[in-house]
Amino acid sequence: MPATPIAKPGSPPLAAPLQPQDGAGYRKALSCFATGVTVVTTHWADQDWGMTCNSFNSVSLEPRLVLWSIRRASHSLEAFTKAGHFTISVLAESQQALAGQFATGSMAERFAGAPTQRQPSGGLRLDGCAAWFDCQLHQLIEAGDHCILLGAVTDFGWHDTPALGFWHSRFGQILSQTPHAGTSAAPGQRQPAAGPAAHGTPTADR
C-alpha cells in the first residue's frame, strides 16, 4: 500500500486529490498562468485560415523553433497540419478586438476588415502586431486531445509596443515599472481588463 503523505505541523492542509471530473477547477488553475495572445494563420486549399491562440511558446534558439497547440477536434486542424506552414502574430495591447474576432465565426468573418500582409510562406500576418513569426511546420506531435505544432522560424519581426496579455480568463496589459496614473497596481503587476472567457482561455480550439 502506498504511503499516505502527512502534513508537517503548521503547514497548509494537503490539497484533496484531483478528481477526473474536476474540469472547471483544472481550467481555473491553468488560467493562473498569464500568457500573451496570438493569432495564427495559414493558407490551404485556396483559403486563408486563422484562429486566436495563447498556447504559443518558444522552444529553441538554435535552431529557431516555436510551438503552439490546437484541439484535435478543431475543424481547422487539417488546414494547419497539411499546409506545411503557419504565421504567428503576437497581438498588441490595442488589438484586443482582433483576439475576439479570430476566436469565432467563419474564416471570412475572421479576416473581414483585418489589416494583413501576405508572407512568402503564404500565411497572413496582422499589421500593428507586437511581433510576428513566419514558420515552416517542423514537427507534429499528438498529445491527448490536442496536437502540438513545432515550427521552424524562417522570418520574424517585432515592434516596441505593449503586447496584449491574458490572465484569469481576462484580457489586460503588462504594466511597466512605473504604474500608469490612476491605477493602484504595484510595480510590475498586471492590470486585467474584461474580455471574452469562453472555455477559460482564448486557446486555438476552433
Image: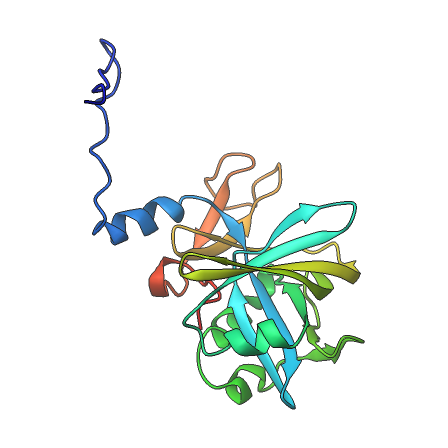
Q: In which quarter of the image is residue 138?
A: bottom right
Left of 167 or right of it: where is 58?
right
| Outermost residue to the top | 9
Q: Considering depth in this image, is 134 or 84 the residue closer to the camera? A: 84
Q: Considering depth in this image, is 124 or 86 the residue closer to the camera? A: 86
| Outermost residue to the front | 1
Quadrant housing the N terminus: top left
Position of residue 26 measured from the top left corner of the image (x, y, whole percent):
31, 47
Position of residue 53 measured from the top left corner of the image (x, y, whole percent):
52, 63
Left of 17 or right of it: where is 160?
right
x 61%, y 38%: residue: 178
Position of residue 188 measured from the top left corner of the image (x, y, whole percent):
56, 37
Is residue 162 in sight in this rendering? no
Left of 59 or right of it: where is 185?
left
Q: Considering depth in this image, is 3 or 129 the residue closer to the camera? A: 3
Q: Does 82 appear above or below 53?
A: below
x 39%, y 47%: residue: 30
Q: Quadrant of residue 29?
A: top left
x 26%, y 47%: residue: 25
User: How many marks do you count on the picture?
Assistant: 0
Left of 26 or right of it: where is 111?
right
Q: Does 46 appear above or below 201?
A: below
Quadrant housing the C terminus: bottom left
x 52%, y 68%: residue: 52
Is residue 173 in sight in this rendering? yes
Colour approach in the figure: rainbow
Position of residue 43 measured from the top left corner of the image (x, y, whole percent):
66, 81
